[in-house]
Each structure stands twice: as structure tokens, then as C-alpha cells.
Amino acid sequence: MNKVLASLLLSLVIVPTGVKAQSDAPRLVVGITVDQLRSDYLNALQHLFSEKGFKLVMQEGVVCEDVLFDFPYLDRAVSTAAIHTGTIPFYNGIVAEEVFDKFTRKERSILYDDQFMGNGTTDYFSARSLLVSTLSDEIKIVGNGLGRVYSIAPDASTAIMSAGHIANSALWIDDETGRWVTTTYYTDAPAFVLHPYYKHSPSNTIATLSWSPMYASDRYTAMPYQIPPYRFTHTISPKEHNRFAIYKTTPMVNDAVTDVSIEILSSASLGKRDQLDMITIGYTLAPYNNGTVQKYGLELQDAYVRLDANLTRLFQAIDSSVGLENTVVFITSTGYFTGEGREPSFYKIQSGEFYPKRAVSLLNLYLMAIYGHGDWVTGYSHNQIYLNREFIKERNIELEEVRDKAAQFLIDMEGVQDVYTQHRILLRSTNEHTDRLRRGMSSTLSGDIFIELVPGWEIVYEDQADTRQYIRHNAVSAPFMLLAPNVPAQKIEHPIDVTSIAPTVSRVLRIRAPNGCTTRPLDIEYK
């Protein structure tokens, strides 16, 4: 009797080495982020979808058609970080995929970290620019580090922002070599994926790429008022210097992402152990070759249909391996669309061209006229002007005074709608517009002056082969879908904030939300 009692007492004080998943708890989380996915196109093309892709989640899960990204600048890094951290750029630190480096006076990746060299790439990247935890971090923590997290995407930003700080690995396709690569920041890269002759590397498949529409062109009805139906066939020449960047705007990159995801699902035994595992997957529906929907409307619709086929294939693999009844799947969008082109001049819609390089030069001349000869302005990035703060300090001039003078000058430039100084945004935020700017900024990475341009104008980057950015305030309906074993089918009719996604998934999993979350989980029904 005493021996039995002693054994029971001993079992109570032993600390487990890992937290095992409960028998009724999900064993796998699949987080899918689709760059530029739109609810309107998704609904308009359902007649071409299978029953086991998008429709499976839309008919059996939680569906919201309107996710709000309530900050001024969106790209793959900003949106993905907000989705997975459950908080805004002001707190998670991710204000843009490319940020202005005040020392080199050039843009650099926000992922750049000279402490961690690339594995298969020359890029030095890490997740240390993320200032808060992610959903994947919390999944790692809840299992005492024993859960496995892998992230696969066409680009580094989506892969790393989804992977978080302590994932096993984040994998993406290198623009230069077309190989799957990662960073030494993560320590568990699957060697077979990184191999130069890996069968699913674009470097080994791009020469045979040929893309034509899956269906007759008159079946693509998401854009009924645009150019007449046509057929297309796209190939990419092996001699094209940016061939892999072009490849990443075709549906074939989504094929490759699915192939790698299914192989890692199997090789890492995700969802088959006693721990909660996660795989994050990035897809793209960006317009072909960075073009416009006016030019490539049929291609964009075909890309939706082909992505549906990839989701069907992915869900079938998950069901065969782990069981969808043991899996939580969520799908969401990056909340923006880059495919709107400038209207031809004969439509007489007001337009113009704004040249940032000229604006910086003129502003510097203006400040020299006031304060004397010197290098007062260091550069421009993402509608922001960066002043030479060190030089201003050396001249013993108040920074805010120079900001105000610069703003007064810039507001009179043609094409400028409004101008805001950093001080006005941070300390004197008094309306909804400045509040929104504040949510998307960083006091260390953002510029001194924010410029708002007139809709219809184009920004012309002279030092980037006259690259153009069209200004159009076009609110995009971005979906969020959640499929979970303990959640019945339901539709959320009202808009939701992107910061509610991570805490909602966390509640479904019964784990902590990421540490930057302040938004409550969505009020959804449970079985």
C-alpha cells in the first residue's frame, strides 16, 4: 500500500518534458496566406472550382468576405506579419518589405540581418525585425519546443513572417538561382529541398514551362466588361535575366509550393506525433509579370482556378496523412491588389506624374536657401521623405522646425494632396486619417514627412528604369476562411480586423494568442 502511494506521489511531482496534445485536440495547423486574393473574384469563379478546394472551406467553415487592414501601406511582409502576430505595424515592427537605410541611403529588405547568412542564397535574412511573437511561435512554446513548424512560400517575406522566430525552417525560391533556399537563422532545413537538383526547384523546371488557360475563355466571367475573350500561351526564356521573378507571377509557382508542402508534410510527419504541429503556406495571385488586370485579366482568372486545384491536392494529402478532422485550416489574403493600370489620356481623367528624385532635390535646394549649404535631405521611400537628422543636429537646429518648413514646401508641389510630419502623426494625432498613419509607422524606420498623392497620378522612379506606381484608392474585399473540427459552418456578415485572425485561431486551438494581440477573437459558434 505504501509503495503504491509513493508511486502516485512521485508521478505528481515529475515535470513532463513536453506537453502532449489532448486526444480531442487538433494535431495540425495549416495557415495559408494568398497574396492579393480577392473575395469578388473568388465568388465570381466558383462555377469553375472543384468541391474539394476553396468550396470545401467556404461551405464547411467560417467565412468572412471583408478583412480590414487598417494601416496605410500594404505589401507581403506588412500584411503577413499582421495576420500572424495579431497586431499592427506600429507594434510588430514590420512597416514595409523594403525600408530606407539611413546610413547607406538605399532601400534594403526589412529582413536583412548580417548575423545570419543564407543557405543556398546570398541574402542575409532573419526574423529578428519582428518585435512580437507569432502564432507559430506560440505553437512552438506550447509544446516546449517539440512541435514542428515549417513555412513554404515563393518569397522570403511571406515565408519568414509566417514562420516567426523559432520555426524549424522557412523556405522560399531565390530570384537569382531559382532554387529553394533558406537562412541559417533556422536550424532544421530539409536537405532534400535545398539540393541543387531537387525535382520541384524552378531552376530545373522553368525551361519546360508553358501556361495556357484550363478552360475556354468564355467561361471566365469574373471580369465581364473588360477586353473580349482571348487565349494565351506564356513561356519563359531560359535567357531572360529576371526569369525567376516572372515565374513567381505564374500559377506554376503555386504548383511548386504545393509540391514542397506535401513532401514536408510527409517527411516531417507533421500532425502524426503527440505534439501540435504547423505548416504555413504562401501562394500568390499577383498579376502576371507585374502587369495590369486590363492586360492580363484572363490570366488572373485562370490563376484562381489553378490555385483551387492546388488546394484540392493539398487538402487531399492532409486528409490522407493526418485527417482533416484533426486539422485546423485557415486561409486569408494580403488585402491589396497591384493590378490596376492607369487610364489612357483620352478618357480625360485627371492624372500626372510625380518624380520623387526631383522632389528630394528641390526640397534640399529650398532648405539650403533657408539654412545654408548642406545635405539636408537623405532620400525618399514609400511616400516618405527622410531628413538628415545628424546634420540638422550638428547645425543646432530643431528637427521639428525643419520638418515643418519641408512640409510647407512639399504641400505646394503638383500632385501632392496632403503632407504630414512624423511629430504630427505620433504626438498630435487628432483624426481618423492620422491615426491610421500612426498604426502603420515606426519611429525608427519611418520617414520624417509623409506625402499623400492625388489619386490618378503615377510615381515615376527614375533610378529604377522609370518604374511606375499608379495611385488609386481601391478598397479590396479580402477573405478569411477557417475550417476546424470543433467549429460549424457559418458566415460573418460584418467586416473584421486583420488583427482578430491570430487570436481567433489561438482560441480554436486553446492556446495563448501572440503577445502583441489586443484584439478579441471573433465571436463564432462552436460545436
Image: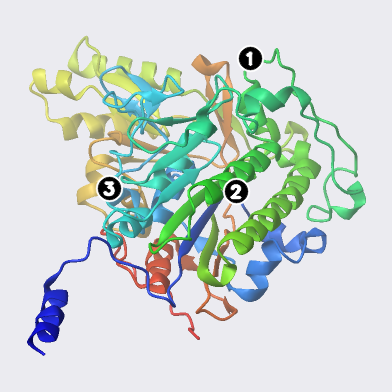
Residue 35 in view: no
Disc 3 on helix, strand or loop?
Answer: helix
Residue 398 in the image: state x and y as whole percent: 12, 30
In front here: 409 or 234? 234
For the residues labelled 3 and 1, the Cα–Cα distance comes to: 42 Å
Q: Which mark is residue 292?
A: none
Q: Residue at x 27, y 51 (%)?
A: 132
Check disc 1: other Cα within 10 Å, few if <14, some if 14-19, many if 20+: few
For the residues labelled 3 and 2, the Cα–Cα distance comes to: 46 Å
Q: Which residue is mark 3?
A: 425
Compare marks 3 and 2 and give the one earlier in the sequence. Answer: 2
Task: Tell me if residue 326 comes above or below residue 235 in the rendering.
Answer: below
Residue 445 in the image: state x and y as whole percent: 28, 35
Task: Tell me if residue 369 comes above or below residue 86 in the rendering.
Answer: above
In front here: 8 or 304? 8
Q: Residue at x 35, y 73 (%)?
A: 510
Residue type marked 1: His
